Image (tube, rainbow, N blue to C red):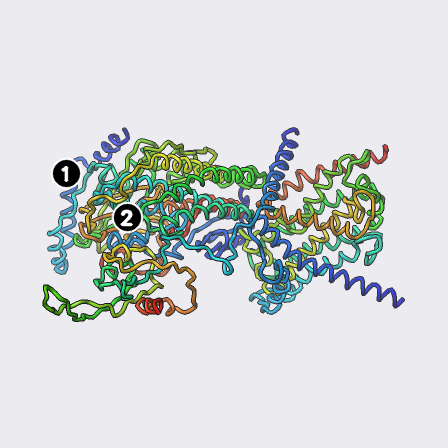
Amino acid sequence: MSGPIHIQPGETFTLNVGPQHPATHGVLRVKMEMDGEYIVKAETVLGYIHRMHELMGENRTYPQVLPNLSRLDYLGALGYTHGHVLAVERAAGIEVPERAEYIRAITVELNRVASHLFWFGAFVMDLGGFTPLMYAIEDREYILDMLEAVTGSRLTYCYYRFGGLYNDIDDEFIDRARAFIPRMRKSLKKYDALVTGNIIFRKRLEGIGPISAEMCRKYGATGPVARGAGINFDVRKNEPYSVYPEFDFDVPVYDECDSLARYKVRMDEMEQSLRIIEQGLDKLPDGPIMPKKKPKLIKPPAGDYYQAVETARGSFGIRIVSDGTKNAYRFKLRSPTYSNMSLFDEACEGMMIMDALAMMGSLDLVIPEIDR
Amino acid sequence: MGAYFSEIFRGLQSLATGLGITFKEFFKPVVTVPYPYETIKMSDRFRGHIELVENEEGKPKCVACGMCQRACPSGCISLASKSVEYEVEVKGEMKTKKKKVLTKYNLNFTTCSLCGQCVESCNFGAITFSKEYNLASSRKEDFHFDLLNRLKERNS
Amino acid sequence: MSLTILNAVIAVVIAIAFAALNAAYLVWAERRGAGRIQRRPGPNVNGPLGLLQPPADGLKLMTKQLVIPGGADKALFMVAPVLAMAPAIMSFVTIPFSDSIVARSMDIGVLMIFAFASLGAMSVLLAGWSSRNKYGVMASVRAVSQNISYEIPMLITVITIVMMTGTMNLKELVASQSGGIWNWNIVPSLSSPLMPISFLIFFTCSLAETNRAPFDLGEAESELVAGFHTEYGSMGFGLFFMGEYANIVIGASLITILFLGGWDCPLGLFPGVWWFLLKIYVLIFSFIWIRWTFPRTTIYGLLNLSWKILIPISLFNLLLTAGLLKVF
Amino acid sequence: MIKDTVLQSLRELFPDPEPVVEEAAAESAEGDTAEDDKKKAAKKKVEPRVNGVIERDHAQYGYDIDVQLDPGELLAAVMILDKAGFFLECVTGVDWIKEEQLEAVYDFSRYDFDLCRVVVRTRTSRSEPKVPTISKIYPGAAWHERETHDFFGIKFDGHPHLVPLLLPEDADFHPLLKDFKP
């Protein structure tokens, strides 16, 4: 759709989308200058649930920060805690037993599927279809139950420890995970028929909300947003960490740059995550889940450490500047949606409000993670 | 012209597929739990708020070392203890020894983030997770738990 | 004379009662149906199967305060919900439920229903505009352009049928289709081979006319919060809600009368009011079913559908039928 | 390898060790007043890192190239990285209170498989922190710079809209400064 042709001064009006608006999935606010249904200019206003996790990271000892990370992104919490433990392990030089790394990979991928499932439902709900959300939640509940049995909590996991895990997985978890894979594959087929093939759905997304590769680069967009713009970038492949090099999986990339491409990337990613889980369960080695000798007090040597991981939303980076004490000197969280959202202001100019909100949905926003 | 009609046809077909799926789901049984009437059992590892563990005598196992208090990221545990003298027989002799006894163990659940650092830091296995999740109240004070009292109530 | 007036009053009261009862219980049916489609029970606490839910909702809405936003046009703000409900009830007056059950059989029944249906768009426009809410204004402008563009294919289809039957009286329309499924208008005949397609067009248009998903752009809760009734609470909202469901009943009745032979049995046996009710409730179920299956269209997708697909095809059908009627 | 070419072009920014000396001289000239004597003494204890390019071990630090330069050279370095096809990962700050300096840290990374993470740091005085904006080159930096301004009070010269982003609109405090008292 082409944008407005003539905008007379004084003929536009300001529309406050949010902070309480169904499409913003939380407390995001976008101040839109509107010309009828067209957006002339948009300005995102953040900070409604800013909690200053970075300062908390400086005030607390390293283990005490552990629960904070899962509060960043309540949908894919394990990916973020994974980044945190990897960063501290890198800084303090802690070895992780192989079994622990495999379990981490399996649980992170399960959490990624759960996160994408919820995004799928919420996204279709943004477009006005309510039912797929319920089907997605049904599958997601299965994962949450599974993770709850292992980690002890449903959303804000505090499962990983520096050097290993809080507790080991049991046979029941493995059985349930194995049973989950065919079940999820069947569900994916159902979603494909119910939503992806639907003509109304396609008409709403095809060619809508273009985000080019160059724009991604300038704004630092990562994750499915970049992959939907034809950029083959996945931290798991580009900068392998943990045991990901052991797994055989593909990175779905679509060149169309539109909302549908971002949708397809996530749907394909779920399948790839299932493959990783499958292989992880097959390869799962025996052994301890915590290293034999672990420093009692974690005091990384002075320095500046960076660790990036691929979460459900993109490349999550964590920078730890240590001064050799038990508290971090600087604790920086680079959240993927922050960068992904920053391109929204530019990308939505000239779009109709319903297309812009569909594009916003395709960015997969989790507001606590933007605001931190 | 052909493309025009084939698009309409394929569109209708995709709509029919969608309708077919929801129609099938219509006859499947419901998957939800009617919550207040039925509840599900929490898993063994479920992390609720913490609870004191008792020893064989029904007294708290806690030795009031304060490790949990220090480990807690949000500072929601506060405990107090007093020294109590007691006599033990060592090699046939009666000796008085001092022991710390827990007099207060308060948990401010409003700031607890359920991370489980306290339970992990405890070297005596004196605290554990409860399985309670139906906590709801409109008063903040209802979540300032006196765990010693709760232990007593459990025993009585 | 007085007996006719009494008759008319009784008929109108029955029409209102039927409309209100339907509106209330269709909300329940919708919620139960949506629940089943989504693998959850739906409202099931108030009374057996949740059947007391509509009265409970009604009581709740009536006891709430009607908040009039500052800067709103008070008179229009209050009139709009009434305007949503009243035309729907008025339309019931002309609808024949069976051979004998009809409040007022009119020769221009079809025309009258369409006249009242257009008033529905008016109420949406007034509600959105008078509440002085940007979302409301955007929604009402959308809804009006939607209603205008969908009335055209709808009326063209009706003209086709009127041409075939030669009457605008709803009762006579049904009478012309009596005697079994092969006489119904939906079944293609030599003079009207495209009637199933006409039926689809009419069905789509009545979805759009009643602002139902996937054409609920006037509400569009994920974009425009609640669209034209964003600022309405209490019974103002309740009236909009009931008006929507009353309109659905009208739409389903119209489809039944125009295409599905009204109270006629598919096999031509025992015609009666139960057949009519069965047909409209099956249609209403399909409305609910469609709503909970599809995502919402865009405003331009909606207009494209109307102007580029529905109108050309229905016009073509009109010409074809006109020509074939001359031949056969 | 992109790493070598970038390393080389970044090294060209530092033709000889002279600029380092100049910077140190300029700083001591700034802190001439008597009040600053104490701070100067503190500064002497902990020497700030000398500007330059360091190659880092990726496995240990998580990045490959570590550049420290003057705020004036920042744009040149960022332009090199932009031309080489890097994307901006994030911008942040570090408060080196003992050295009386604020550091702005820029993380760059690549989309292709030629793994190379570059960290660009620039230090500015704590009393009047000023760094040129890179949002003209990377529009995505606008938000990161606003955030850094929120938390550290670093002024980004030429930023189009330097108002609080995560903090309230009227915030006049900078919570990540080490002397911040809530």
- Outermost residue, right side: C1
Which numbered dot is residue D17?
1
The percent position of residue B65, horizontal first and vertical second, equals 21, 62
Crowding near the residue tagged with mark 1, few <14, some 14–19, many ≥20 C-alpha atoms within 10 Å: few
Which residue position is annotated with label 2? A161
- Report whether C71 appears left or right of C157: left
Residue drawn at the location 61% of the way across and 54% of the way down? C32
Q: Are marks 1 and 2 on the same chain?
A: no
- Would you say A95 lies left or right of C70 here? left
Q: Is residue C315 above or below residue B154?
A: above
Q: Amino acid at mark 2?
A: Arg
Q: CA distance from mark 1 to mark 2?
A: 44 Å
Q: Chain of mark 2?
A: A
Question: Quick one: quadrant of the N terminus of chain D?
Answer: top left
Is D9 in front, or is A363?
A: A363
Q: Position of residue C82 (x, y in %)?
A: 68, 63
| Residue type, label 1 | Pro
Residue D159 point in image, percent of width and height: 34, 49
Give the class, few, some or many, for how many residues have Cα within 10 Å of label 2's Cα (few <14, many ≥20): many
